[in-house]
Image: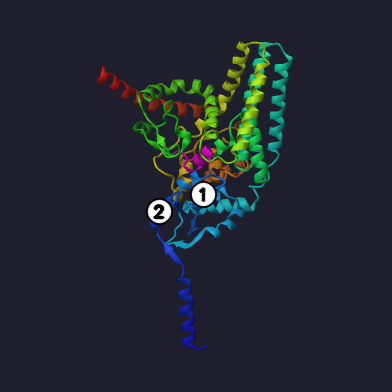
Amino acid sequence: MTISSTISLVEVLGTMLNDKKYISLQELEKHNKADDLWIAIQGKVYDVTSWAKVHPGGDIPLLNMAGQDVTDAFIAFHPGTAWQYLNKFFTGYHIKDYQISEVSKDYRRIASEFAKAGLFEKKGHGVIYSLCFVSLMLFACVYGVLHSNSFWVHMLCGALLGFSWIQVAYLGHDSGHYQMMTTRGWNKFMGILIGNCVTGISIAWWKWTHNAHHIACNSLDYDPDLQHLPMFAVSSRLFSSLTSCFYGRKLTFDPLARFFVSFQHWSFYPIMCVARVNLYLQTLLLLLSKRKVPDRGLNIFGTLIFWTWFPLLVSCLPSWNERVAFVLVSFCVTAIQHVQFCLNHFAANVYVGPPKGTDWFEKQAGGTIDIACSSWMDWFYGGLQFQLEHHLFPRLPRCQLRKVSPIVQELCKKHNLPYRSLSFYEANVTTIKTLRDAALQARNLLWEAVNTHG
């Protein structure tokens, strides 16, 4: 081969390599609307405008991260088999000067190592044990209601029902993250069975809010799990009446909200005792709304099953006093779980604005608090005491979370990121302090309003 022909070959190869089309991150950010929705994964740009309408995780996660690099979030929520479906959405563009942070490099490395080790598929026998435990508690509850005349036995049955709802909620959470069963179809079936039919809380509602929570962890205007006005405000930044990008309405901090928030550190536990009522209401509002709801018919059918067997069970009690007490006891027991969910996030770092795909690990570390406990108590918390581990690897079965926790801690230490693990008591104290701090600020505003208007 002559020198001239060699030079020509190099020029051709160089031209082929330069045939790639590039856009900058700034240009990508312009495609951030429902009718023009682009994302980037590992430097390649995809148009998911039409896919957002049928995305199994809903359109909210895609809309919240539209016009961004979403590689870390994609890795977190999708199995390896999902990568093969990306090509049909490829625009032909690549990100110009694509760079990866050191945190993301380490995150992607350990996610790959977990996948190679088969941790996402090793679900253990915890689901079988939990189902047996829940079935036993539900049987004991029904048996006690039907075959005993003792008031205290009936109250114990109410407590058993409440505790079974807690454990069922953990199973529903597992099925919603496709951790429970081996296929997506079976996970959907179990989600509706144990979610809608047993607890009365729609799995469709849970997915709608929970996926948004995972993507925008502790964003005051994007994370629905922090949007509890007029009853609670975890930060004084909510006093400016932020607009909820999840609900599409203003979170109005009016005089009524100011009053309730002023005493929220006192009202927190009483409200948690009846928080379940709000979940039933949210389920009803979603299933009867005009919003597109996946499997709406199945969700309504499952919810109707709950509202058939639960009132029938309560009606078997001998008096209205016992019926009311039974329901209240069952609700008060579930308050343990409602409190736990708040402990994981209320006292963590918060921010305003949409989530950023370039600081996925950092936002999850900042927005979560783990609950320290012995391994024999893992069943009690449903694995969610490892909140950061779960947020980083939401598809990881709960039986694997304790195993990967030291790796996550080491990674946080390496990159100087927060890893907070508190005892149940310490987490309660920290949460109440956070609520109290915001309450005192709201109270000052309340007194200013009173003094101003007489």
Name which residue lies at 59% across and 45% down: 395
Protein image colouring: rainbow
Magenta span dominant secondary structure: helix
**Magenta span of residues:** 208-218
Q: Is residue 269 above or below residue 9?
A: above
Q: Camera-side residue: 421 or 31?
A: 31
Work out whether 42 lies above or below 300: below
Q: Position of residue 244 (x, y in %)?
A: 41, 37
Q: Position of residue 31 (x, y in %)?
A: 42, 54
Residue 362: x and y in percent read 46, 45
Q: From this viewpoint, is residue 294 visible?
A: yes
Identify the amino acid type marked 1.
Ala
According to the picture, the residue beneath numbered tag 1 turns out to be 52
Q: Which residue occupies 59% across, 36% down?
A: 203
The kind of residue tagged 2 is Glu
Q: Residue furthest front?
A: 290
Q: Write down the residue under mark 2.
A: 29
Distance in Å between CA atoms under marks 2 and 1 = 17 Å
